[in-house]
Image: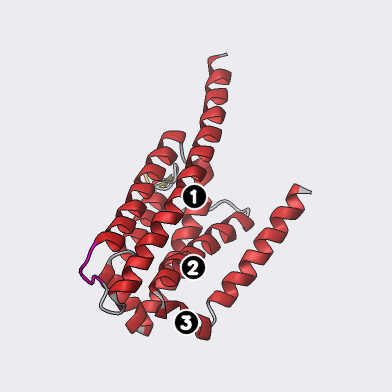
Amino acid sequence: MSNLFIILFRTLFLTVSGILMLPVVDIYLDSIMALHMSAQMGGLVLLGVLTAKTIKKPLNIFPILKAGKTLKLNQYGVSSLIFFLGTITFWMIPRSLDLAVTDNMVDYIMHINLFCAGFLLGKSLEKMPFVLKTAAGIYGLSMWISAGLTYSRYNLLLCATYDLEMQKETGELLLNIFWFAFILFLILTAKNLIKFAQQSGHHDK
């Protein structure tokens, strides 16, 4: 039953994501800053993550040869995590947001970049150590609330494409989403901590 639910959820989300990327819908989302940063950018990342989870084949990213042996630079998901956090940080910069709205080529690059970031993250989550996942989660939440506070409290226009009212609304939305993300982070961290403790107990035996 749970597998059927997961399949239905992924199918529904993939369908909704496809609709969100239609040109008409894309233009509408670009016109509203809050939707651009939440529904569009977040949807592209989640689409990449779910696509990665759907494809079961392992992915060896950036393999190189040294002394006749293949070295996996993404063995613990570090390379994918750096790429993901760098991508999110870049597209949350006001100037990047402006370019994604005003320049079609930059908008295409943003779509591909965010999808790839989500895909690589989805492929690497299971191989990441508990400490790395926790540190990344704390960093991501810190970055998210910083953006929310900046956009909601700053009284100067940061994005030339939008007005100050939209900017403050976006900040408030990011702050509201932060609390849901924070609760989810605590739940997942507790789950991973229990799993980590169980694995450590097995190793000690």
Looking at the image, tell me whether mark 1 or mark 3 is earlier in sequence order: 3
Is label 2 in a helix, a strand or a loop?
Answer: helix
| Residue 49 visible from this viewpoint | yes
Dominant SS of magenta comes to loop
Q: Which residue is mark 3?
A: 28
User: Would residue 155 be counted in the magenta stretch?
Assistant: yes
On residue 180, which mark appears? 1
- Label 2 crowd (10 A; few <14 / some 14-19 / many >=20): some
Residue at 39% from the left image edge and 47% from the top image edge: 73
The label nearer to you, 2 versus 1, is 1
Q: Residue furthest left?
A: 156
Distance between the alpha carbons at the discs numbered 2 and 3: 11 Å
For marks 2 and 3, the one nearer the N-term is: 3
Residue that badge 2 annotates: 39
> What residue is shown at x 37% (from left), y 67% (from top)?
169
Identify whether 82 is placed above or below 172.
above
- Magenta stretch? 154-158
**Where is residue 165 shown, x and y percent of the image?**
32, 72
Q: Quadrant of the C terminus?
A: top right
- Say which label, 2 or 1, has the lower sequence index: 2
